[in-house]
């Protein structure tokens, strides 16, 4: 996850990651967010993270702007309502 996050921060691309290693728990998410933050810090970028918790999908986009850290949690199939 760290290397993919670093590459996304470097190239300015969106990273969409589907967690399939087991249950996406709060502890696992905390570790992933630390890796995402570390990759952004190395490239002087701020991560904007959206999480679809039921489907365990994490979307990361890095920006040059210094914004307050936040995590957005979405419901499954939110766009279909």
Image: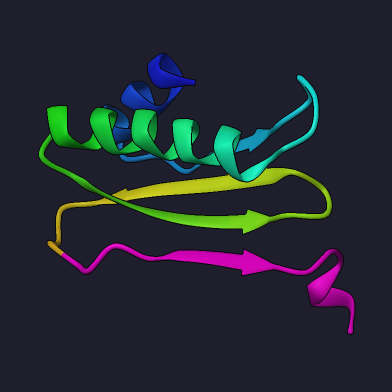
Look at the image and say whether residue 36 sits in the magenta stretch: no
Q: Residue at x 40, y 19 (%)?
A: 2
Residue 64 image point, x, y percent: 15, 53
Q: Residue at x 79, y 33 (%)?
A: 23
Farthest-out residue, bottom? 81
* Numbered label tally: 0
Q: Quadrant of residue 13?
A: top left
Question: Which residue is nearer to you in this view: 26 or 48?
Answer: 26
Question: Which residue is nearer to you in this view: 33 or 47?
Answer: 33
Above/below status of 48 relative to 67: above
Please state if 42 lies on the left or on the right of 34 as rendered.
left
Which segment is the magenta one?
Answer: 67-81
> If the image is split into quadrants, where does the C terminus sit?
bottom right
Q: Residue at x 48, y 32 (%)?
A: 32
Above/below status of 71 relative to 37: below
Farthest-out residue, front? 27
Residue 26 image point, x, y percent: 60, 45
Q: Residue at x 37, y 65 (%)?
A: 70
Farthest-out residue, top? 3
Residue 75 image point, x, y percent: 78, 69
Please state if 54 lies on the left or on the right of 65 as rendered.
right
Above/below status of 62 relative to 10: below
Please state if 26 lies on the left or on the right of 5 as rendered.
right
Judging from the image, the colouring scheme is rainbow
Q: Quadrant of residue 16?
A: top right
Q: Quadrant of residue 52?
A: bottom right
Question: Which residue is nearer to you in this view: 40 or 7?
Answer: 40
């Amino acid at each position: 996850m760290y290397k993919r996050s670093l590459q996304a921060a470097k190239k300015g691309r969106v990273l969409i990651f589907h967690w399939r290693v087991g249950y996406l728990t709060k502890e696992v998410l905390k570790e992933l967010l630390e890796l995402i933050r570390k990759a952004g810090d190395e490239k002087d970028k701020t991560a904007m993270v959206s999480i679809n918790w039921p489907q365990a999908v994490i979307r990361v986009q890095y920006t040059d702007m210094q914004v307050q850290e936040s995590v957005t949690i979405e419901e499954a199939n939110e766009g279909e309502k």
